[in-house]
Image: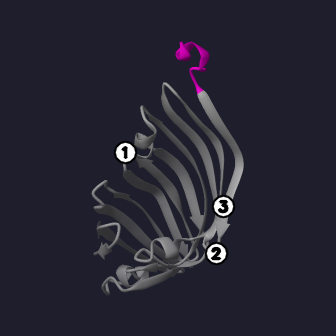
């Protein structure tokens, strides 16, 4: 019959597939296989992606470089996206956070509205439609902030950051919580 003629597994491989526009460049290498179910295995690289364009309520300005591994197994092609798992690391050079001023937080003067940083980096994990951002480190002069946050499948945000300023004979510390939603994050002291 036809089952004996068709191979049990078909695959499409791609190497260094690129896409770019004014918002950044993405490249991918990997394989999409199907037969008894579907399987995706991909390595992604991002260069100069304009994060402010995609997440304006998080970032006023900022360009991201990163790399990630994407994988998914599903019985049908339509279920592949829902079962995607991604693990990677992102770095940003100078940029501006939206919705918080870390200097004001550490000085106990409220939350503020924006904050210019020199570097921002961290890990990202997407699994079962949940995003976990961990090992986050932000630097700006004498200030450093570290922390983690998650975005649940229902879009709820939860996280916490520790802030420290070390200068000559001064050391200030503070912390800030992160709540709200992916579309409207809220920083709270």
Q: Quadrant of the C terminus?
A: bottom left
In the drawing, does residue 71 fall left or right of residue 18? left
Q: Earlier in the sequence, mark 3 or mark 1?
A: 3
Secondary structure at badge 2 equals loop
Query: For residue 8, what is the image quadrant?
Result: top right
Q: Residues within 10 Å of mark 1 (few under 14, many from 20)?
A: some
Residue marked by disc 2: 22
Which numbered disc, 2 or 1, marks the residue closer to the eye? Answer: 2
Q: How far apart, in angstroms, are the residues tagged by discs 3 and 2?
A: 11 Å
* Callouts 2 and 1 close, C-beta under 8 Å: no
Name the spot of residue 183 as percent of width and height, x first.
34, 71
Secondary structure at badge 3 equals strand
Residue marked by disc 3: 19
Q: How far apart, in angstroms, are the residues tagged by discs 3 and 1?
A: 26 Å
Q: How far apart, in angstroms, are the residues tagged by discs 2 and 1?
A: 30 Å
The structure residue drawn at horizontal position 53% and vertical position 71%, both measured from the top left corner, is 51
Residue marked by disc 1: 128
Residue 179 vs residue 76, the one in the foreground: 76
Q: Which residues are magenta?
A: 1-9
Q: Is residue 83 visible?
A: no
């Amino acid at each position: 019959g036809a089952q004996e003629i068709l191979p049990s597994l078909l695959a499409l491989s791609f190497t260094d597939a690129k896409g770019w526009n004014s918002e950044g460049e993405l490249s991918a290498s990997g394989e999409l296989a199907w037969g008894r179910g579907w399987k995706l295995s991909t390595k992604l690289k991002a260069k100069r992606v304009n994060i402010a364009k995609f997440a304006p309520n998080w970032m006023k300005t900022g360009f991201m470089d990163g790399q990630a591994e994407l994988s998914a197994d599903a019985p049908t092609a339509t279920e592949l996206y829902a079962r995607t798992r991604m693990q990677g690391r992102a770095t940003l050079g100078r940029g501006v956070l939206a919705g918080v001023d870390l200097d004001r937080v550490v000085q106990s003067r409220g939350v503020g509205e924006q904050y210019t940083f020199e570097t921002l980096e961290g890990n990202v994990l997407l699994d079962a439609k949940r995003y976990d951002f961990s090992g986050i480190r932000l630097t700006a002069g004498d200030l450093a902030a570290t922390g983690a946050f998650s975005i649940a499948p229902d879009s709820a945000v939860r996280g916490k950051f520790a802030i420290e300023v070390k200068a000559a004979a001064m050391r200030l510390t503070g912390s800030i919580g992160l709540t709200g939603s992916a579309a409207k994050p809220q920083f709270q002291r």
